[in-house]
Structures are given as C-alpha cells and as structure tokens.
C-alpha cells in the first residue's frame, strides 16, 4: 500500500478554527500545525520530548506536539501560542509580562514557555496556589538555551499575582 493510500482524514480544532487534512499516520502534530494549519509559532528543538519548544494545549492540557501524532489529536481542541492573544492582536497578560520582565532572548523557547505558563495560570484561576519554588519545578519541563529562566519565572509570577489578587 502506498503512503498516499495510507493517509487518513484528521480534523483538529486549532485556536477556534477547524483544520482538516489527509495525513499519514506517522505525521506529528507539530508538523500538522506548522504545515497544514500554517501556524509556525510552535517550534521544534529536540523532537524527543526533552525541550518543550513544541508545547501546545490539547483539550486544555499541555502536550508535546513532537511526541503526539496528528491522528491522536483528531477531534481535539488545540491551542498554540498564536491562539493566546486576542483577535485584535492584543497580547495575553502573560505574553505582555514576558516582554516587561525580559523573559526571552532569542525567543526560540518562548512559545513553549508561554503555553506552559498559560496552563499554570488556568490552574491558579481554578484555585491552585504556587510558591516560587513550585513554579521553578513546573518550568523545568522546558529548556531555554539562552538561560533566561529568571525573567521567565518573574513574568509568570507577576501574572499569577494578578490572577490570584
Ligand atoms: S521538540 Fe518537542 S520536546 Fe523538544
Ligand atoms: S530565549 Fe533563546 S532559547 Fe530561550
């Protein structure tokens, strides 16, 4: 059977829009997002689950899109970094805080960290509380090669203080 015959229809709701495509079963979600949805904000660094650059929200929970097959996301709601800002382009409070607290240098890791931080903010809105050390542990899921961790942590902590105040 040829690769073309093996393709399967996949429909993913991405940032509020349905994205439908025929994909090979081995197609990664990150490639589906970048190539089929034309959303290139989700990056790939390691392709092995280590760096977190490819982090997206899948049905509200962070997922490594380099370890998730597009067919696994069929029918799911996926939010990428592009989906975090308002339709008019206004940045989310966390995105704005990254700017104000110098939470990035080259910016390669930033989409993954912002998505991870968005998950943490949602947990805080639901009543969870976090110490700075706990936030550090959560952020350790992702890697920044520019070692901009302090700014990332400061940005998240500042946004959290707005959420829980
Ligand atoms: S590219 Fe997915 S974790 Fe590194
Ligand atoms: S800002 Fe460069 S990898 Fe994090």
Image (cartoon, grey):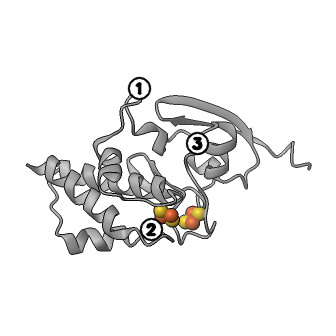
Check if mark 1's residue and mark 2's residue have beta carbons within 8 Å. Answer: no
Up the image or down, 142 lies above or below 74; here it is below
Up the image or down, 140 lies above or below 68; here it is below
The numbered disc on residue 67 is none
Mark 3 or 2, nearer chain start: 3
Instruction: State how far apart marks 3 and 1 are (Cα).
Output: 25 Å
Residue in view at x 36 percent, y 32 percent: 90
Up the image or down, 147 lies above or below 108; here it is below
Q: Is residue 84 left or right of residue 126?
A: right
Q: Nearer the viewer, mark 3 or mark 2?
A: 2
In the image, 140 versus 125, the foreground residue is: 140
Circle 2 packing at 10 Å, graded few (<14), some (14-19), many (20+), is many
Q: Is mark 3 within 8 Å of ligand 1?
A: no
Residue in view at x 23 percent, y 72 percent: 134
Rendered location of residue 20, percent (x, y): 65, 32
Mark 1 or 2, nearer chain start: 1
Check if mark 3's residue and mark 2's residue have beta carbons within 8 Å. Answer: no
Q: Name which quarter of the figure residue 123 lies in.
A: bottom left
Q: Which residue, given by chain and number where applicable, does mark 2 sit on?
A: 142
Rendered location of residue 37, percent (x, y): 63, 36
Dot 1 lies on which element?
Answer: loop
Q: Which residue, given by chain and number where applicable, does mark 3 sit on?
A: 74
* Count of marks, rendered view: 3
Q: Is residue 15 left or right of residue 133?
A: right
Instruction: State how far apart marks 3 and 2 are (Cα).
Output: 25 Å
The numbered disc on residue 87 is 1
Dot 3 lies on which element?
Answer: loop
């Amino acid at each position: 059977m040829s690769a073309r015959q093996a393709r399967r229809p996949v429909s993913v709701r991405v940032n509020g829009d349905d994205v439908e495509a025929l994909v090979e079963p081995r197609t990664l979600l990150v490639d589906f997002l970048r190539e089929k949805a034309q959303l290139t904000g989700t990056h790939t660094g390691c392709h092995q689950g280590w760096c977190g650059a490819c982090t997206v929200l899948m049905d509200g929970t962070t997922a490594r899109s380099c370890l998730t097959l597009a067919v696994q996301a069929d029918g799911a709601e996926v939010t990428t970094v592009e989906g975090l800002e308002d339709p008019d382009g206004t940045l989310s409070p966390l995105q704005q805080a990254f700017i104000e607290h110098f939470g990035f240098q080259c910016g390669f890791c930033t989409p993954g960290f912002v998505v991870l931080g968005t998950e943490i903010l949602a947990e805080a809105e639901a009543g969870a509380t976090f110490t700075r050390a706990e936030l550090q542990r959560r952020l350790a899921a992702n890697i920044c090669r520019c070692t901009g961790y302090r700014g990332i942590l400061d940005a998240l902590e500042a946004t959290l203080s707005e959420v829980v105040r």
